[in-house]
Amino acid sequence: MENNSFYRAEKAAQTRKTVLKTLSYILLAVWAVMVLLPFYWMILTSVKDTAAYNAEVKPEFFTLSPTLENYAKAFTEVNLGRYFINTVVFTAVTTVLMVAVITLAAFAFSRLNFRGRDILFTFFLSLMMIPSELVVITNYVTITDMGLKNTFTGLILPSITSVFYIYLLKENFAQIPDELYYAAKVDGTSDFKYLMRVMVPICRPTLVTVIILKVIECWNSYIWPRLITTKEEYYLVSNGIQEIRESGFGRDNIPAMMAAVVVISVPLIILFLIFREKIMSGVARGGTKG
């Protein structure tokens, strides 16, 4: 009897486990469809013939005659190539400058001993409580007063630092034993050389994560470029897509506009798919050790 009761209990537990696992897979499948459906619709629309798309009475979820003509129109009839180059320049320069700034700041807060360091860092963290809208307004007034509107300097300058990234990197630097620093100082190593040869290599996963996240942030930047640039030669891809949508080209040729969106989205999708494990491990590393 005891064996039968144990068998029934084990079988019931196994059944519950199977049911819960099945429900989990069903929910994940539904969630995946909801997330991926907009991307599928975007790509599908981009390869539809414009006349066929306009003639659709109800949405069609497949096409028997795909075309790449819309992609050619996206580059020839609008300045998508210029927007793309502007975004690459903005993203590269901003990311390089930000990494330099946050690395030096994180090193100072984690390793250097100076009067008021902890108070200053606490005040620095409190800046994260300020609404981003207020920061945008302040930055806009400052950049405009400096005469940097419609310049790459005005686009880049407010984005070269981040309190969160400084905090994340500082917490990683703080985990490196002090003995390494003291031994380096005994050998006559300068602070900068110790930073570049010891701390940066040890914390490379977190730095890679910060770089990838910053690239994604810059690529998707919309509000600040929209405020500070009114000339088309300084538009980024996000602003360029908005201009395409508002123009007659975007309203009359939805497939070509979707083709432009695909061209802009693909680099970020590929970047995330390649480095997704580094992103997750870097954030987890910073959060666990912090």
Image (tube, rainbow, N blue to C red):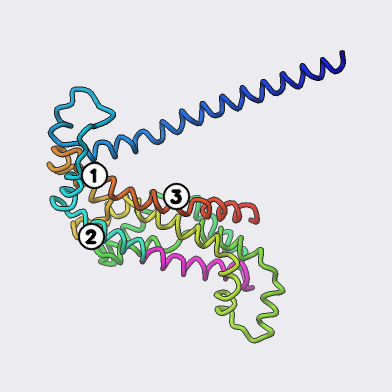
Q: Nearer the viewer, residue 85 or 286?
A: 85
**Label 2 amino acid?**
Tyr
Mark 1 lies on residue? 259
Above or below for 200 versus 78: below
Badge 1 crowding class, 10 Å Cα cut-off, few under 14, some 14 to 19, many 20 or more, is many
Q: Nearer the viewer, residue 117 or 230?
A: 230
Quarter of the image that includes the N terminus? top right
Mark toward the start of the polypeptide (2 vs 1): 2
On residue 165, the disc is none
Cα–Cα span, label 2 and label 1? 21 Å
Mark 2 lies on residue? 234
- Residue 185 in the image, given as x and y percentages of width and height: 66, 82
Mark toward the start of the polypeptide (2 vs 3): 2
Mark 3 lies on residue? 273
Q: Nearer the viewer, residue 124 or 86?
A: 86
Helix, strand or loop for the magenta stretch, by majority:
helix
- Residue 165 in the image, given as x and y percentages of width and height: 51, 58
